[in-house]
Every structure is written in C-alpha cells, then in structure tokens.
Image (cartoon, helix red, strand yellow):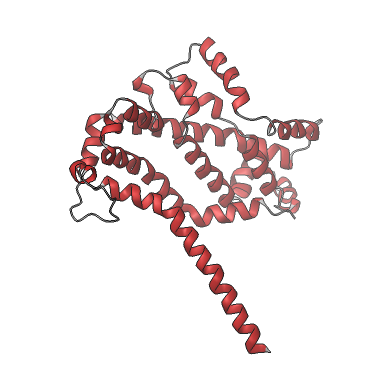
C-alpha cells in the first residue's frame, strides 16, 4: 500500500512538473525570440522565409542602430530621473502615512482609513482626465514636476505597509516611549529595519511601475526632451525606423527590459518575503 501511494505521488509530481515546464517555456519563449531577433542582421532577418530558432552569425549592429537612430540614451536618462524622483517622494509620503494609521491614535483615524481604502475602488483611468486638466492649468506640461506629481502616493502601498507595521508588537513601542524615543526615531530605528523586506518590495514595484509608465507620460509630454523609454519605443515604431528594421527595434526593447529583469533577479527573495509578511496578520 505504501509503495502504491509513493508511485502515485511521484506520478502526480511528474505531471505537475511537466505542466510547469511547458508553462515556463511558453512564458519565456517571447523573451528568447526578442533576444534572438536583436542579434540577427537586417538582411538575415528579412531573408528568413521560415523563422529560425538560432542564428549562426550574431551581430551587435542592431544595438548600435537603436542608440544612434533615436536618442535612446536621453530617454534612459529621463526615465531614470523620473523613476528615482517618484519613488523617493512616494516613500517619503507613504511610510509616515502607514506609520500614523498603524501606530498613532487620533480622532477619525478609522473613518479616514476607510475612505482611503474606498479610493482603491476607483480605476486610475477615471482620474487621468482630472490630473491632465490640473497639470495643464498649472503650466506643468513637459516638466518632470508634471510627470512626477500624480504618482507620489499609493493607497495600496500605504495599506500594505500599515498591515506590516501592525505585526510589530506594541510592547516595543511602549518600551521605546519609556526611554524617551520620538515617533520618528522609533520608525527609523525599529520599524523600518524590521519591515525592510516589505519596504524593498514596495520600492521595487514602484520602480517597475515608473519604468513601464506609458499612458500618463504620453499624455503630459509632447516634447522629445522629456520622453521616457516607453515614449521612446513608441517613437521608434512611429518614425518608420522600427517598422522597417525589426531587429533594431527588438534590440531597443531588450536594452529597456534588462534593468527591470536584473532588478527583479537581485531582489526576488526580498520581494517574496515582503509579500508574505504583508499578507500575514498577527
């Protein structure tokens, strides 16, 4: 009986791993195809009546074309500035807010937090027009201020940090107060180190969100000097270069995708820990 159970268990695991392997191949194949195409020459790509899964003569010519045909380096710099500014300001806003909701006592706290959660029910698309009109009337179009302002807060991230902060025992807070520790110092010295995985998770997710931003930057900027990489890819496609030279277009996409892939690979363990901590209560 034990042997039969063991055999069925091995078969079940084998089937699960088989499906997971097939699913992994299906997910990773587009990335492989993008990378492969970026190393094919323009003539080799156009001469393939049947697409090949490998190339015998890889070339870096497409990467050179991607940077010389359009100001891709400038798009990178703009995206880096936008991402760093937005993420830094957002952390400066949401961390004290999450701390206030989780640790401090003030009149109307539960009502205010309930209203905050209610905002999560409103799709972002509904506030785009309002933000666009506001930023335009303030004269902030084609500026980094106009790009950054609508993204400096997040109800979801405040909620995630609040749930994580509430897992820290109250006894630590009371002991710190007895020692004369201020709330800011307690937050900086105790809560943030303990909740570091969640803070890193929020930071990484915000960086990815900023890096992939498309709709808002597309609406608020029509000056190429403020284009982000997402706008840059659209510009590459629209100016004819991307439509004609698919390998160079793929090279540009690879260059833009690599920073996010490396970021996730470096912090993947912290992200998993942060998500797990944010989902536990007690």
Question: Residue 183's spot in the image, x, y percent?
Answer: 67, 40
Q: Which residue is drawn at 25% across and 47% down?
A: 49
Q: Residue 174's x, y, as percent? A: 75, 48
In this picture, is 59 found above or below 100? below
Question: Could you tell me residue 94's position as x and y percent?
Answer: 61, 36
Q: Is residue 174 visible?
A: yes
Depth check, front residue: 39 or 182? 39
Vertically, is 58 above or below 87? below
Apparent side of residue 179 relative to residue 27 in the rendered image (left or right):
right
Task: Locate the N terminus and report the quarter of the image it occupies.
Answer: bottom right
Seen in the image, is 134 located left or right of residue 59? Answer: right
Q: Is residue 229 above or below residue 194?
A: above
Q: Residue at x 42, y 18 (%)?
A: 142
Q: The C terminus is located in which quarter?
A: bottom right
Depth check, front residue: 48 or 250: 48
Q: Is residue 237 left or right of residue 118?
A: left
Residue at image position (75%, 34%) is 113
Location of residue 124 in the rendering, given as x and y in whole percent from the top left corner: 61, 29
Relative placement, left or right, of 177 versus 8 is right
């Amino acid at each position: 009986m034990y042997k039969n159970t063991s055999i069925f268990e091995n078969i079940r695991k084998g089937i699960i791993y088989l499906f997971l392997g097939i699913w992994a191949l299906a997910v990773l194949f587009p990335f492989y195809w993008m990378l492969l195409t970026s190393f094919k020459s323009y003539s080799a790509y156009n001469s393939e009546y049947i697409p090949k899964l490998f190339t015998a003569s890889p070339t870096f010519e497409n990467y050179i074309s991607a940077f010389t045909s359009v100001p891709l380096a400038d798009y990178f710099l703009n995206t880096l500035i936008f991402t760093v500014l937005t993420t830094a300001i957002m952390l400066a806003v949401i961390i004290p807010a999450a701390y206030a909701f989780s640790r401090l006592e003030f009149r109307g706290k539960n009502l205010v937090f309930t209203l905050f959660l209610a905002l999560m029910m409103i799709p972002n698309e509904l506030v785009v027009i309002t933000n666009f009109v506001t930023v335009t009337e303030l004269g902030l179009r084609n500026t980094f201020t106009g790009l950054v302002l609508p993204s400096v807060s997040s109800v979801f991230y405040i909620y995630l940090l609040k749930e994580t902060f509430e897992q820290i025992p109250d006894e630590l807070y009371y002991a710190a107060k007895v020692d004369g520790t201020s709330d800011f110092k307690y937050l900086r010295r105790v809560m943030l180190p303990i909740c570091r995985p969640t803070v890193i998770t929020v930071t990484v997710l915000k960086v990815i969100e900023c890096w992939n931003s498309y709709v808002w930057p597309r609406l608020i900027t029509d000056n190429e000097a403020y284009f982000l990489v997402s706008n840059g890819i659209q510009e590459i496609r629209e100016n004819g270069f991307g439509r004609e030279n698919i390998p160079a277009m793929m090279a540009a996409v690879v260059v833009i995708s690599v920073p996010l892939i490396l970021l996730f690979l470096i912090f993947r363990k912290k992200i998993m820990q942060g998500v797990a901590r944010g989902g536990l209560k007690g």
